[in-house]
Image (spheres, rainbow, N blue to C red):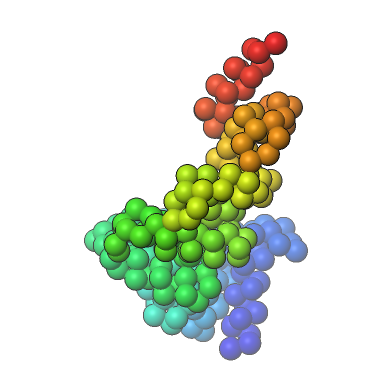
Amino acid sequence: MKMSQEKCLLGYCYQMGSGTEKDDKKAVEWHQKSAQENNSMAMCNLAYCYQHGIYLEQNYDLAFNLYQMSANAENSMGQYYLGCCYQEGIATTKDEIKAFELFEKSARADNKLAQFKVGWCYQYGKGTSKDEGKAFIWYRKSAEADNVVAKNQLAYCYSAGVGTKKDETKAFKWFQQSAKEGNVSAQFNLGVYYNFGIGTKTDKEQAKLWYEIAAEGGHDEAKERLKKLLSVK
């Protein structure tokens, strides 16, 4: 088991370029060796490579089967990605109820990506009954576990009063955290908050800065807001 885990970690290091030069070929080789020894995380990593064509020829069926094996072995990341397959209909029939069940199981094992998905499912009633209060709870769990996307969504909940009392100061705080971690939507929203003094003091220079950052990230509305801000003398 220990050797299998070490092989899995080595594959991850090569895939992410962590502590060594990024090498997809070596990553896949180590994922395969570890997966052959029934390491559930390696199965998930190998599935991801098949799904996205990382060194291997893209194969959704193999990806789905490996995700399923990983999920059946109670791997929370495998459960999460298998849930995504059911949600999007990747190599299987689209099934939002099954997707939600897998997301929830993964989320309860503290997977922050799945926690966000559970929040999303509750917010929009996908695979379960719509419940904005529960959506807020799961977004908060994910955000507090350092999921940058969840931080932006939690900020939105505070700004719009979704599942919680409206609180622009808290919204600003979470937009700021998410923006600093690279979320383009949060960067735009932070620009808006500084521009109009929402949840913070008005600061046109900070608004300009965050509109620029969001625009560079491809946010079209940020580009328009930036033009308007610069046109004001």
Residue 156 image position (x, y, % from top left): 51, 46
Query: Which residue is drawn at the image coordinates 59% and 83% (left, top)?
Result: 4
Give the residue at the far left of this rendering: 93
Q: Is residue 43 above or below residue 228?
A: below
Residue placed most toward the observer, 70 or 188 = 188
User: Is residue 60 visible to the viewer in this orientation of the structure?
Assistant: no
Query: Which residue is drawn at the image coordinates 48% and 55% (left, top)?
Result: 164
Query: Which residue is drawn at the image coordinates 47% and 70% (left, top)?
Result: 107
Which quadrant of the figure has residue 201?
top right
Q: Is residue 187 above or below residue 203?
A: below
Residue placed most toward the observer, 69 or 118 = 118
The image quadrant where one finds the C terminus is top right
Q: How many marks?
A: 0
Which quadrant of the figure has residue 146?
bottom right
User: Is residue 168 visible to the viewer in this orientation of the structure?
Assistant: yes
Residue 231 image position (x, y, % from top left): 64, 12
The image quadrant where one finds the N terminus is bottom right
Q: Is residue 185 above or below residue 66?
A: above
Which quadrant of the figure has residue 25?
bottom right
Give the residue at the far front of this rendering: 165
Residue 15 image position (x, y, % from top left): 61, 61
| Apparent side of residue 206 relative to residue 80 in the rendered image (left or right) | right
| Apparent side of residue 206 relative to residue 46 in the rendered image (left or right) | right
Residue 64 image position (x, y, % from top left): 36, 66
Residue placed most toward the observer, 189 or 166 = 166
Query: Which residue is drawn at the image coordinates 42% and 63% (left, top)?
Result: 134
